[in-house]
Image (spheres, rainbow, N blue to C red):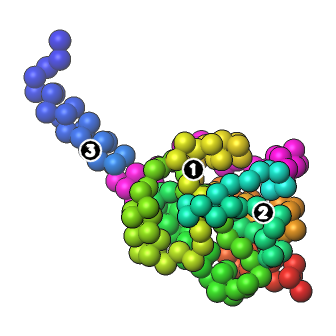
Amino acid sequence: MMNSKKLPLITGLGIFILTLVLFKLVFSGPSLRAKPFVLDSTQKAHYENIFIKDKYNFRDGEKVDFLKFNEEIVILNFWASWCVPCVKKFKDIRKLQNKFENKIKVVGVNSGENLSDKEYKSFKQKHKLKFKSIKDAENNILSKFHLSFLPAVVIYHKGKVIHFSNDQKSFKYKAIESQISKLLK
């Protein structure tokens, strides 16, 4: 039997640990991965095949056909409103859109949540999103890309994968900006 004098200490310790876990979730966002996912040549080919073959609809009903975009660079940005690192990444996405204006196309994939049109418009306005998103409430697209966590970004140049990042830290704005600049010369 447990000594009744130790019970408050154990309870306090349990509350402290629970508080630390909740603090991490609130300020870092949930993380479902043990280690970053590295894109190999087979996965790259799979992503490029999706780019060529798959058709989706934006939330407003407009068809998404990657091959019919006029822009050479397409950025596929997987995000969710509850994902703190995803929201932080929007700033860098906006900077790329401002710098390269009509030369890049950003397509969002709103994964794992079923925002109403009103909630989506409010979120889009609050975060000054200048890109349209595909609704992926059931994570079908996320699964097709073999991803199980957010954020994730796939960047294509003329249908070929040139960049993949699967967390906030691997999305290095300056390196991506430089790479896009070189490709668009």
Which is nearer the N-term, disc 1 or disc 2?
Answer: 2
Q: Which residue is mark 1?
A: 136
Q: Are marks 3 and 2 in contact (CB under 8 Å)?
A: no
Location of the C terminus by quadrant is bottom right
* CA separation in Å, label 1 and label 3: 36 Å
Give the image location of residue 172, x and y in percent: 68, 71
Q: Residue at x 49, y 78 (%)?
A: 128
Query: What number is the disc on residue 106?
Result: none
Q: Which residue is mark 3?
A: 16
Q: Residues within 10 Å of mark 3 (few under 14, many from 20)?
A: few
Which amino acid type is marked by label 2? Phe
Compared to residue 178, the image places residue 24 above or below, namely above
Judge by depth and name the residue closer to the eye, 19 or 63: 63
Q: Residue at x 83, y 46 (%)?
A: 46
Compared to residue 12, the image places residue 103 above or below, namely below
Q: Which residue is mark 2?
A: 66
Which is nearer the N-term, disc 1 or disc 3?
Answer: 3
Which is nearer the N-term, disc 3 or disc 2?
Answer: 3
* Number of the front mark, 1 or 3: 1
